[in-house]
Image (tube, coloured by chain):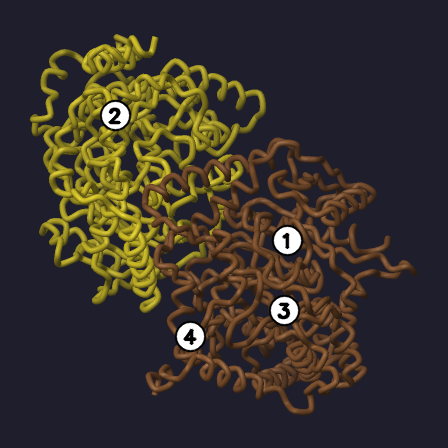
Chain colours: A brown, B yellow
Amino acid sequence: MASTKESLPWQTLASTHRDRAFANIPKEWHLSPEILSAISPDARISVAHIPAQSKILSPRELEITETLDATALLQKIGAAEYSAAEVCTAFCKRAAVAQQLTHCLTEIFFEAAQERAKFLDEYLKKNGRPLGPLHGLPISLKDSLNVTGEYSTIGYVSFISHGPAKKNSPLVDILLSLGAVLYVKTNLPQSCMTADSHNNIFDRTLNPNNLALTAGGSSGGEGALIALRGSLLGVGTDIAGSIRIPSICCGTYGFRPSASRIPMGGQAIPARPGVPCFLPVTGPLAASARDLRLFMESVIRADPWKSDHNCLPIKWNVPEEQKKLRIGLILEDPLRACEPEVLHTLQSAAQRLTSAGHEVIPVTKFPSIVGAEKLALSYFALDNEHYPIYHATKAGEPLIPSLTAAIEAGFGYEKKTMTLEDLVQMNVEKEELIENWNEVFERDSFDVLLTPGAPHQAVPHDTYLRTTYTIVWNLVDNPACIIPIATPTENGHDATEDLHEGTVKHTVQVVGRNLQDEALLHCVERISVALNYST
Amino acid sequence: MASTKESLPWQTLASTHRDRAFANIPKEWHLSPEILSAISPDARISVAHIPAQSKILSPRELEITETLDATALLQKIGAAEYSAAEVCTAFCKRAAVAQQLTHCLTEIFFEAAQERAKFLDEYLKKNGRPLGPLHGLPISLKDSLNVTGEYSTIGYVSFISHGPAKKNSPLVDILLSLGAVLYVKTNLPQSCMTADSHNNIFDRTLNPNNLALTAGGSSGGEGALIALRGSLLGVGTDIAGSIRIPSICCGTYGFRPSASRIPMGGQAIPARPGVPCFLPVTGPLAASARDLRLFMESVIRADPWKSDHNCLPIKWNVPEEQKKLRIGLILEDPLRACEPEVLHTLQSAAQRLTSAGHEVIPVTKFPSIVGAEKLALSYFALDNEHYPIYHATKAGEPLIPSLTAAIEAGFGYEKKTMTLEDLVQMNVEKEELIENWNEVFERDSFDVLLTPGAPHQAVPHDTYLRTTYTIVWNLVDNPACIIPIATPTENGHDATEDLHEGTVKHTVQVVGRNLQDEALLHCVERISVALNYST
């Protein structure tokens, strides 16, 4: 059967696969043709208001999806103020709307989610306590995570023939054991190596704040879905910025943990096994800073190293309360200049942090960030067989435009064949870089660095070619977090309430020290309060 | 000056360096010409009795060095029953005797040690409490560890020109902060890649139980010194068995921790920086099982990741008390048959463990150990420039016989040039091997595996060519421990008292799970009690 199927044109395979997935959206949740007709990758419009106006969600469902973060929602489910079932329905509806507006989803399993939510409601009723710290929370998953019975095509037509996953990724099992409700998987780029979450099966994810801009990638489906509050907490992966770039583009929180804290095992991956490289990581995108901690703390307290041997057995390390943070400010690497609005965002963030009582100290000497990007990309080039491209060409499908552009720009695939000697030199350079960044932290006893996440905010489709300011932290393996900064509203009310209005377009990146994820998350919460809440 | 010095013949450089080091042994501690005349690498004699008979140590110094392990000795120093100064003198004397019998030392700094011990005695007197958990304990260090002002030639004449170390290795700083007294560095092979601790500067370390046998390597100076109780606790390093092989040959306890638990940073190393390989580790050799734990716990509780960024921030994890251990028994890989006495040792150990109430279950299916050895050696071969040999040939000195033999036997240096593609294939094979060994543990819920450490016990010089049963655990990164088994004495008294008599020649290897060093150490103590103490 598989061989017959594979002999079909890729277009047929892709459209059949897509139609099957989207048939899981009930007809009554379809947007009106009037709304849909305006949706296009060229439309310079925000769709942030549409979920509320679509009439698909009831007022109570809008309340559930719009007014809380995951932490607060969990409290209400735990107190039986909301049932897991109604929360599930609300987010399924909103995710369905988000999908129609931005093409942010891949696999959709609303029915299984409803079953699960009902089970959790019964559990709570029967036992008088939640199943776990994520009891009843709908969590969205990047397509690379395996969920039994669901496909993990990660943007390749050739991966359709792999069939549905036979078992859950270890992280998926952990999330279920903690009480999560799984309902959707989210879109990503063919190859996972560009910042445009676009592929020949599930199309291109659009930016809800402006459809003509990229939603970022590779976890771009998560970025768009969370920005539209079709999910409050989602799981992405990041080897060059794939969690943080969608957060920058869509204005969500996004956390790249240190390598090997959160299970990365048992996922569908584009990379060739065995090629030496710094490690990809799994981590959260979320609606609030404390939701990032909720995810990290819940997963790590579940001893993930027992189910994924590549996870480090580092227990959740309750961070020390820091009254006053020492923050190193890096505005830009002169070789990759930032746009004025990015510099302005950083400078005003520094001012607000200073006003809040923290110390912000400009870092005058630091290793070349552009140099680190170059070194990191040469690690990607070590795959002389170019697996991420091979998987695409295997089915005869064309490369997505952003991948072609990335290759032309020298992203990873150099013309020359890489050698063992290249690797040896690169490893020496990497070790030196790690030492030098450690020195930056130690010289001035910085708690965190405040830096740009990119030299710009969201850009037009297929033009986000440089991951300079994100990939450096993958290479040296420091945890790093994108914090959206709400534009203060005129009446001075809590600016985070505007998250779903699409008004958040500015972000900063905060960087901690290797494996001190807990300490960074603590600082992120402090910094987020200073930058986003009127006090 | 350095260039003038380097133009001298290597023989002159080596002998000058050696004479300078050994001039630090006071004349009154020299053994009689009568005793010395019997010392030779061909002499099939034990020298285990000589320290007691030499009259260099007083009866009290013999008591200090012979009757206690480090844990008990620390209690007595803490209670001021022994002063740190007299303990220091006792071990300096005994190390001096051991050096003359077995050539186990490199750098000797008795005077600095005495100063330090006096300082500690004053500290205790003044403060009423010890400086730290290792207060007053003399700790010996493999030559690769840097101690400010001392050389780290690691068996290369060419390294003499590096001059004395300008700063301590991070681990050395930690040991000092914990109260240790440092007094000697210990011998190792030119290249650190053979099991004969032999080089052209400090000569060949002999086995105190039988001078005609190897003391093992690469931390062979530690093995001989501890077997003669010239040290109770020493620090070695291990990338193929370099802690465990001397323990096997000399009959001491030796523990190979998981990678990155104990600082490996800031040491002199023979390897070419940047060459991809599984990691070397630093760990203890000791006179008792609990002393291994003492070392591991003290160092890890000192937050070593703060001074060595390559250390994992995994806090000391107090292991659960296990009443009954589940022990998987692996007698041998059929492709590397063990000598009958090794099999007999394992079988009788299994019997004693069963009698002590533990479950010993033969492992019927396990990955090829010989295959793992082959794979591990091909990682060493990835250094196409053969640095460990280059450092030797640089000064014109000849290779030691065991290194020549190892090269001929294919130890690491294959004729062909290794490529990036080789590495990719090897990495895939390694990952699979790690998975398969994890399965061995999980399938039967084993706490530990009981295996041979080698297919033989100590062998004649330059014939210990295969590290099969030790290197497998470096490759898959499981902690592993050598436990010496005392030959029960006829009158049934506590057999460990015979450790210094040179009667211990049998050992077993006990293997735990990656990064679960605490759990393994707990099992090692339990197993050691069952195997070494009459109950």
Who is closer to the viewer here, A414 or A58? A414
Residue at the spot of label 3: A133
Q: Nearer the viewer, mark 3 or mark 2?
A: 2
Against A215, is B186 above or below? above
Instruction: Tell me whether marks 1 and 2 sit on the same chain.
Output: no
Image quadrant where residue A49 sits: bottom right
Q: Is residue B531 visible?
A: no
**Is B489 in front, or is B143?**
B143
Lower sequence index among marks 4 and 3: 3
Whether residue A462 sits left or right of residue A7 in the image: it is right
Chain on which label 3 sits: A
Q: Secondary structure at mark 1?
A: strand
Q: Is residue A365 above or below residue A512?
A: above
Whole-Å distance between the Cαs marked 1 and 4? 31 Å
Q: CA distance from mark 3 to mark 2?
A: 57 Å
Real-space CA distance between mark 1 and mark 2, rounded to the nearest whole angstrom: 47 Å
Which amino acid, by three-letter code, is at mark 2? Gly
Within the image, what quadrant is residue A47 found in? bottom right
Q: Secondary structure at mark 3?
A: loop
> Which amino acid type corresponds to the residue marked 1 in the rendered image?
Cys
What residue sits right under mark 2 in the picture?
A: B155
User: Looking at the image, which is closer to me, B149 or A453?
Assistant: A453
